């Protein structure tokens, strides 16, 4: 069941990226970047079983941020792709900070949501900081690597620069995030094992986003 829902969510999420792009052009992608980075933070709190391993429920939403920057990189420019990364960074920073204030407000006796909010947003500051930092770094590296490969391949092999940049940066993000967040609290071999599992799942997601990148180029060509 999880596998079916996983692919359904992937298709749905990447299709929404194209809808935002079709309706609002690059501004729609900026809006999606803010939405995805904030929603992914919530999804990260839940762990699910997939393909015989485990990963966070927010992995598809997080992967969609790479699709956004790749579309902006391919259709517009590196500058526009970086702008989306900055928007996502400020959005998730504002979201986590705002929810921290809400979380620490003393609840009324009639409150029914405080415990749920504390579970979702009472994240250890070290983990939150590591998550935000690695999102920012990995997405900027994805933008740069995408352009480096494009300089060598020209307009050809879009699938190559899309997948190489996304998989390399996403995989690196998994390892470094876990090290920053859990080094000293979790054995290194366990960190390595979790990072490999997460990278396998996210590689599948990265491959799935390639057709949507080609569709984005067709949307531009028809306008």
Image: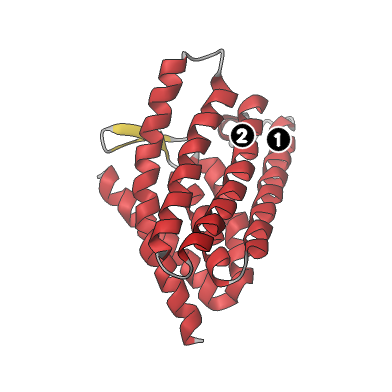
Q: Residue furthest front?
A: 152
* Cα separation between marks 2 and 1: 7 Å
State how the image is colored: secondary structure
Q: Is residue 144 above or below residue 138?
A: below
Of helix, strand and loop, which one carries label 2? helix
Whether residue 79 is visible to the viewer of this picture, yes or no, is: yes
The residue drawn where x is 72% and y is 46% is 94
Task: Read off the residue under disc 2.
Answer: 121
The residue drawn where x is 53% and y is 67% is 74
User: Where residue 108 appears, x then y in whole percent?
Assistant: 70, 33
Q: Can you tell which quarter of the image residue 98 is in?
A: top right
In this picture, residue 56 sits left or right of residue 131: left
Q: Are marks 2 and 1 in contact (CB under 8 Å)?
A: yes
User: Where residue 150 appears, x then y in whole percent?
Assistant: 51, 62
> Nearest the camera: 150 or 195?
150
Of helix, strand and loop, which one carries label 1? helix
The image's mark for residue 152 is none
Whether residue 124 is visible to the viewer of this picture, yes or no, is: no
- Which badge, 2 or 1, comes first in the chain's sequence? 1
Task: Read off the residue under disc 1.
Answer: 100
Q: Is residue 107 above or below residue 158?
A: above
Q: Is residue 69 above or below residue 112?
A: below
User: Where residue 164 appears, x then y in whole percent?
Assistant: 43, 50
Q: Within 10 angstroms of label 2, few (less than 14), some, or many (20 or more) residues? A: many
The residue drawn where x is 59% and y is 37% is 113
Q: Residue furthest bottom?
A: 223
In this picture, residue 114 sits left or right of residue 221: right
The residue drawn where x is 38% and y is 50% is 205
> Nearest the camera: 55 or 152?
152
Q: Can you tell which quarter of the image residue 117 is in?
A: top right
Q: Is residue 56 above or below residue 187?
A: below
User: Where residue 181 appears, x then y in whole percent?
Assistant: 58, 25
């Amino acid at each position: 069941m999880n596998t079916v829902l996983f692919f359904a969510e992937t298709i749905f999420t990447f299709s929404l990226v194209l809808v935002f792009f079709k309706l609002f052009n690059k501004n729609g992608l900026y809006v999606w970047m803010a939405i995805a980075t904030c929603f992914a933070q919530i999804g990260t709190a839940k762990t699910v079983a997939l393909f015989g391993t485990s990963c966070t429920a927010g992995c598809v939403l997080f992967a969609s941020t790479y699709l956004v920057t790749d579309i902006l990189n391919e259709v517009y420019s590196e500058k526009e792709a970086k702008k989306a990364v900055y928007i996502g960074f400020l959005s998730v920073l504002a979201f986590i900070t705002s929810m921290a204030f809400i979380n620490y407000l003393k609840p009324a006796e009639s409150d029914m949501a405080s415990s749920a909010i504390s579970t979702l947003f009472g994240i250890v500051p070290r983990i939150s900081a590591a998550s935000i930092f690695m999102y920012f770094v990995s997405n900027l590296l994805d933008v740069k690597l995408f352009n480096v490969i494009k300089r060598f391949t020209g307009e050809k092999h879009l699938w190559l620069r899309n997948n190489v940049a996304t998989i390399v940066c996403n995989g690196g993000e998994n390892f470094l995030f876990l090290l920053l967040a859990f080094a000293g609290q979790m054995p290194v071999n366990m960190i390595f094992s979790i990072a490999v599992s997460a990278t396998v799942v996210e590689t599948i997601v990265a491959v799935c986003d390639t057709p949507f990148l080609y569709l984005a180029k067709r949307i531009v060509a028809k306008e």
